[in-house]
């Protein structure tokens, strides 16, 4: 019985893992450049989920959803969601982080925690005014599933995975091949030197926030499509886990974030499914968040540079 | 300009403070229900702090307000005493966190875990819950046990602090924030689920009824008594804060906060020093947790969420981390804002709604504005007043006094250089 659910558990884990991976990219990009944990990144993901779902609901209310190809609807949601969250990320950087770039390290972190709580309540207000509720039930565009005999893969999970892979490949190409990508890597290595090489550091940081945030927002859209119900607090715990994934892979490292996210998703899914039966019901699925945090703590203690990162010696 | 004016500002004249206290006390006495008068009396403590007079008079005035005026005038009003003791509980917690965040510079986002440890330590044994795993039907303990349990709560929370700190404190800076946040959540999830395999915390149902404290046969189950208990604990914690601040340990904390590497090379043991900060901060939260459990007579995991941790952090940051008067102000301000102003405002809006003037969706109820308010406050403080409302003062050593002291002639360490001999 335990083995027969394994394929399903793996599919769930992979879906979750790819979402963690894309959100983790946002954390890791910002950390790579500013050495700063963008606490509000999880909330940007959440805003993306709400924007995408609202687009769908509004289109549905206007009646334009009927007869529309679901793929076009999905692309529309993703594009609008990414535009809004990208702009939001850049705005947050401009208002709440940039003035603090030379402040002691804890100060921007405190500002980021503030932004995170502010966004949660702003979304709640907006939804309360617009719909008198603070959570949303999203219509699901793709309800079919593909039966492989030993497991059935829901179409929506497949879409999450495919789009996540497209985004990861696109980002990798962008960072490695384009002029702006090279500028980004240069700034991550040394801001002062990069600025001497006529790279506009402020612009590169803005671009980083733009890309990271829009990736997070797109993941939010996918999350809403995959799970159906969203509330303003989904971003917090997911953000924390995505951060764990980024640390697991080695923070500042793009490949690390992707692999870390997938590993974490799989581990969490496995733990959720098997911890209960294996411990005789004493520690069930309610401990799966504990499991993810424990991984974070263990990694930070024993391999703080992560799977792919390089150990950095502290300089005076 | 503004700085010059601030420098020439010696303090509020004594007379003005006394008039302020007398005025608001009279207002509170005559206008039974005036919330403003009550807040005026509470905040006169801040006025006293800034009064231009000697320390003794300030202490006498402060004691007068806290021990005579507030219990004397508002003592029979359950609600005021409830607010005052709640303010006290948060002041005490914020002062505990001040040691961790303010002095040692360790951003702890899971502080409420220690509060929970203290609360559960008392709650489990002061209800019949402990019978579930200790044979002999010895429980619940009577209210007299509250007093020894203040120490038990302190010790339990300190042990928790050390156990959590040992792995966590090896991690630096902003990682520490995330890890403590994770630990805070872990503790809450564990308390929420520890009703199986052995029922220790009774899970989400929580524990009740928790015995009220008893002293010489008096059952202390009203906010009036808790007000004094809290005051006693605050006095203890403030004293500890002041004594720690300029002690050898306190200076080591501040050195670590300013520059870990430099502190380490001056011979400060990082882990040990951080661990003491963690344990001491935690132990204060533990004591307050015991009081909280006894006061509420009910605990469940929902009292110990991340929002509590953030709330206490906002108090410390807003008031001025590392600054004792600042933290007291921050805690008083945030608590009054939460339990008083937002609630009053929401009652006001509800009355408007029932009169049919406005339509208020349930989610827009101002008493739910917590995150919004905390968020805005954190951002504004970080951007415009990173040192808080009352920034911490650094103690200045008077070099001339050191030169003239009898120790100046002993050629020891840095003193030998200062005297130039």
Image: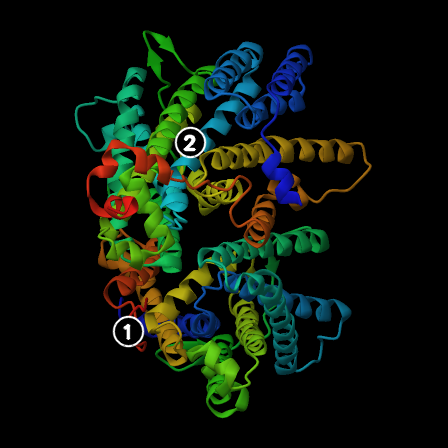
Residue A270, position in %: x, y? Answer: 31, 66
Locate residue B281 relative to residue B19 in the image: left or right. left
Residue B389 vertical position relative to residue A316 in the rendered view, above or below: above
Identify the residue position indicated by label 1 in the image: A311
Q: What is the number of the mark on residue B368? A: none
Residue B278 showing in the rendered view: no
Residue A140 vertical position relative to residue B333 in the rendered view, above or below: below
Residue at point 19%, 30% (across, down): B134
Residue situated in front as seen by the camera: B77 or B106: B106
Residue at point 28%, 71% (across, down): A313
Residue A166, position in %: x, y? Answer: 50, 85
Residue situated in front as seen by the camera: B261 or B153: B261
Q: Hey, which residue is sitting farthest left in the picture?
A: B136
Residue situated in front as seen by the camera: A6 or A37: A37
Q: Quadrant of the C terminus of chain A?
A: bottom left
Residue B371 vertical position relative to residue B156 in the rendered view, above or below: below
The image quarter containing residue B292 is: top left
Q: Quadrant of the N terminus of chain A?
A: bottom left
Residue situated in front as seen by the camera: B351 or A25: A25
Chain at numbered mark 1 = A
Circle 2 crowding by C-alpha within 10 Å: few under 14, some 14–19, many from 20: many
Locate residue A180 relative to residue B181 in the image: left or right. right
Residue A206, position in %: x, y? Answer: 58, 74
Residue at point 23%, 59% (across, down): A278
Residue B296 vertical position relative to residue A262 in the rendered view, above or below: above
Identify the residue position indicated by label 2 in the image: B92
Classify mark 2: helix, strand or loop: helix
Residue B319 showing in the rendered view: yes
Locate residue B149 relative to residue B59 in the image: left or right. left
């Amino acid at each position: 019985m335990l083995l027969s659910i394994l394929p399903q558990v793996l599919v769930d884990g992979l879906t979750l893992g790819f979402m963690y991976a894309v959100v983790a990219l946002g954390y890791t990009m910002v950390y790579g450049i500013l050495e700063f944990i963008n606490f509000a990144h999880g909330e940007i993901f959440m805003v993306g989920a709400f924007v995408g779902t609202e687009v769908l609901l509004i289109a549905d209310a206007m009646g334009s959803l009927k007869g529309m190809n679901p793929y076009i609807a999905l692309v529309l949601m993703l594009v609008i969601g990414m535009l809004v969250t990208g702009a939001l990320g850049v705005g947050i950087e401009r208002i709440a982080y940039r003035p603090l770039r030379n402040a002691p390290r804890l100060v921007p972190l405190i500002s980021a925690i503030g932004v995170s709580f502010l966004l949660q309540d702003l979304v709640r207000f907006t939804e309360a005014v617009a719909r008198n509720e603070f959570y949303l039930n999203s219509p699901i565009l793709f309800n079919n599933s593909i039966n492989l005999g030993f497991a059935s893969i829901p179409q929506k999970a497949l879409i999450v995975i495919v789009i996540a892979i497209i985004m990861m490949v696109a980002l990798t190409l962008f960072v490695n091949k384009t002029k702006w990508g090279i500028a980004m890597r240069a700034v991550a290595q040394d801001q002062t030197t990069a600025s001497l090489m006529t790279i506009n550091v402020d612009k590169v940081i803005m671009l980083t926030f733009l890309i990271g945030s829009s990736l997070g927002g797109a993941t939010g859209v996918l999350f809403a499509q995959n799970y159906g119900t969203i509330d303003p607090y989904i971003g917090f715990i997911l953000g924390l886990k995505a951060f764990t994934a980024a640390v697991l892979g080695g923070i500042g490292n793009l490949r690390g974030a992707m692999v870390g996210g997938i590993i974490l998703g799989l581990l969490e899914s496995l733990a959720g499914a098997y911890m209960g039966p294996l411990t005789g019901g004493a520690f069930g699925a309610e401990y799966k968040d504990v499991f993810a945090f424990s991984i974070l703590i263990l990694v930070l203690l024993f391999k703080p540079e992560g799977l792919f990162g390089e150990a950095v010696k502290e300089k005076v | 300009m503004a700085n010059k004016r601030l420098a020439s500002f010696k303090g509020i004249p004594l007379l003005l403070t006394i008039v302020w206290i007398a005025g608001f006390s009279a207002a509170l006495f005559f206008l039974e229900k005036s919330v403003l008068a009550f807040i005026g009396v509470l905040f006169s403590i801040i006025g006293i702090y800034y009064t231009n007079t000697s320390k003794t008079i300030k202490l006498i005035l402060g004691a007068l307000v806290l021990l005579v005026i507030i219990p004397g005038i508002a003592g029979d009003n359950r609600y005021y005493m409830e607010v005052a003791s709640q303010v006290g509980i948060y002041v005490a917690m914020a002062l505990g966190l001040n040691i961790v965040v303010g002095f040692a510079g360790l951003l702890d986002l899971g502080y409420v875990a220690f509060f929970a440890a203290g609360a559960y330590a008392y709650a489990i044994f002061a209800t019949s819950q402990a019978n579930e795993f200790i044979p002999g039907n010895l429980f619940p303990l009577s209210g007299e046990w509250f007093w020894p349990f203040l120490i038990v709560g302190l010790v339990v929370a300190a042990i928790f602090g050390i156990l959590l700190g040992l792995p966590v404190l090896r991690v630096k800076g902003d990682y520490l924030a995330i890890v403590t946040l994770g630990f805070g959540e872990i503790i809450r999830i564990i308390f929420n689920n520890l009703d199986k395999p052995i029922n220790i915390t009774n899970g989400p149902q929580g524990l009740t009824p928790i015995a009220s404290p008893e002293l010489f046969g008096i059952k202390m189950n009203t906010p009036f008594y808790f007000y004094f208990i809290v005051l006693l604990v605050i006095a203890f914690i403030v004293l500890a804060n002041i004594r720690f601040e300029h002690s050898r340990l306190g200076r080591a904390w501040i050195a670590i906060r300013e520059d870990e590497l430099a502190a380490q090379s001056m011979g400060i043991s990082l882990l040990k020093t951080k661990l003491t900060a963690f344990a001491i901060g935690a132990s204060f939260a533990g004591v307050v947790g015991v009081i909280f459990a006894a006061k509420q007579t009910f605990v469940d995991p929902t009292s110990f969420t991340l929002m509590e941790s953030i709330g206490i952090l906002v108090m410390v940051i807003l008031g001025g981390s590392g600054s004792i008067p600042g933290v007291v102000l921050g805690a008083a301000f945030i608590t009054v804002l939460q339990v008083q102003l937002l609630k009053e405002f929401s009652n006001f809006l509800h009355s408007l709604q029932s009169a049919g003037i406005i339509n208020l969706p349930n989610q827009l109820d101002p008493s739910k504005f917590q995150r919004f308010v905390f968020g805005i406050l954190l951002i504004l403080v970080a951007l415009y007043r990173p040192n808080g409302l009352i920034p911490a003062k650094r103690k200045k050593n008077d070099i001339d006094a050191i030169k003239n002291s009898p120790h100046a002639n002993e050629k020891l360490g840095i003193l030998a250089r200062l005297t130039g001999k």
